[in-house]
């Protein structure tokens, strides 16, 4: 994904023909963070804490449902991806940017959690090769992070590094 230019309406990005279906597929995975991952408190206990946790869980479930519906509408917009010689261009309106970054972050962090929260600071000699079953999660985590960085750089009006 690369930054094309900023307009009054938002920021125009380009995704090549290989990235576009990956971008759509990754967005379609939302939500990935497990629902029970957001504890209100690690130390509070008792009926009030349980009631408060239940309220938080309900609010997060509503937010996930709203985001999932918004993703579907956003992706199905008739002219979302406009064909160009380098693939497809799409405009990300400024009001959509934070929302899309939140969605991509959920996918990235959720994948990391499902991978067991690997720590990149481990000694390389101690690292075991990842289970082939987990390769897809690694790819999802890395690609969602790549899309996040491209959007952030585009919002700053810069080209993404490494593109």
Image (tube, grey):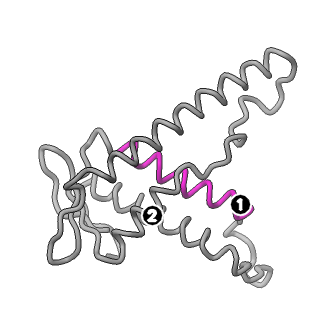
- Contact (Cβ within 8 Å) of mark 1 with mark 2: no
What residue appears at the point 77 percent right and 81 percent down from the top-left corner?
A: 128
Q: Position of residue 91 (x, y in %)?
A: 22, 53
Give the image quarter of residue 115.
bottom right
The disc placed on residue 83 is none
Residue 114 included in the magenta stretch of the image:
yes
Per the image, the residue denoted by label 1 is 117
Q: Give the left or right position of residue 33, taking residue 123 as reference.
A: left
Secondary structure type for disc 1: loop
Label 1 CA crowd tier, 10 Å (few <14, some 14–19, many 20+): few
Q: Position of residue 105 (x, y in %)?
A: 51, 52
Q: State the extent of the magenta-drawn residues as a range.
A: 97-116
Dominant secondary structure, magenta = helix
**54 relative to 64 in the view: left or right:** right
The x and y percentages for residue 4 are 18, 64
Residue 67 higher or lower than 133, as above or below: above
Q: Which residue is mark 2?
A: 25
- In front: label 1 or label 2: 2
The answer to whether 127 appears left or right of 31 in the picture is right
User: Considering only vertical position in the picture, is 127 above or below 105?
Assistant: below
As drawn, the residue found furthest toward the right would be 46
The C terminus, quarter of image: bottom left
């Amino acid at each position: 994904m690369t930054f094309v230019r900023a307009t009054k309406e938002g920021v125009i990005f380009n995704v090549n023909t290989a990235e576009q279906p990956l971008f759509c597929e990754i967005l379609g995975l939302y939500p990935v963070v497990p629902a029970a991952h957001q504890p209100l408190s690690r130390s509070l206990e008792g009926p009030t804490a349980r009631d408060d946790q239940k309220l938080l869980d309900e609010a997060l479930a509503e937010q996930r449902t709203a985001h999932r519906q918004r993703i579907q509408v956003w992706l199905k917009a008739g002219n979302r991806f406009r064909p160009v010689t380098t693939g497809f261009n799409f405009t990300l309106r400024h009001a959509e940017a934070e929302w899309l970054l939140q969605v991509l972050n959920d996918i990235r962090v959720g994948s990391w959690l499902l991978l067991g929260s690997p720590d990149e600071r481990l000694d390389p000699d101690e690292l075991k090769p990842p289970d082939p079953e987990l390769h897809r999660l690694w790819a999802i985590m890395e690609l969602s992070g790549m899309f996040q960085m491209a959007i952030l750089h585009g919002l700053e009006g810069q080209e993404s590094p490494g593109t």
